[in-house]
Image (tube, rainbow, N blue to C red):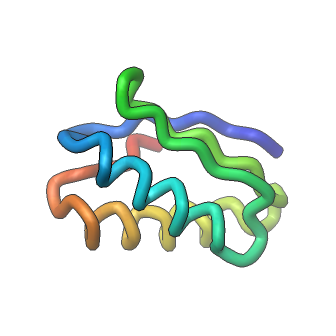
Amino acid sequence: MKKTYKLQDLDCANCAAKMEDAIGRLDGVSSARVNFMTQKLTIEAEPSNLDSVLDEAQRICSGIEPDCVIVR
């Protein structure tokens, strides 16, 4: 299942690349894209794992950019 989410307060293109790489390596994630220009995160993952993947993705985003929030 592929879903797209808005990112709030993503301020750095380099940080977006770091987030994309880290989220893409999570268990259950087929692909992850963080677009700095559109401020969007696109995740492809199993529907049953999506909530836990999003929780972990938020932890990753906050670790890289403390103010960044995934809007669900």
List the single residue furthest toward the bottom: 27
Q: Nearer the viewer, residue 50 or 32?
A: 32
List the single residue furthest toward the front: 14
Residue at 27%, 72% (x, y): give it: 63
Occupied quadrant, residue 67:
bottom left
Q: Quadrant of the N terminus?
A: top right
46 on left or right of 6: right
Q: How many marks?
A: 0
Residue at 58%, 43% (x, y): give it: 33
10 on left or right of 17: left
38 on left or right of 43: left
List the single residue furthest toward the top: 38
State whether residue 5 is above or below residue 48.
Answer: above
Residue at 40%, 22% (x, y): give it: 38
Residue 9: x, y in percent? 20, 40
Q: Nearer the viewer, residue 21 or 40?
A: 21
Residue 6: x, y in percent? 42, 33
State whether residue 5 is above or below residue 49.
Answer: above
Occupied quadrant, residue 66:
bottom left
Residue 8: x, y in percent? 27, 38
Residue at 41%, 60% (x, y): give it: 18
State whether residue 59 is above or below residue 68.
Answer: below
Residue 31: x, y in percent? 73, 52
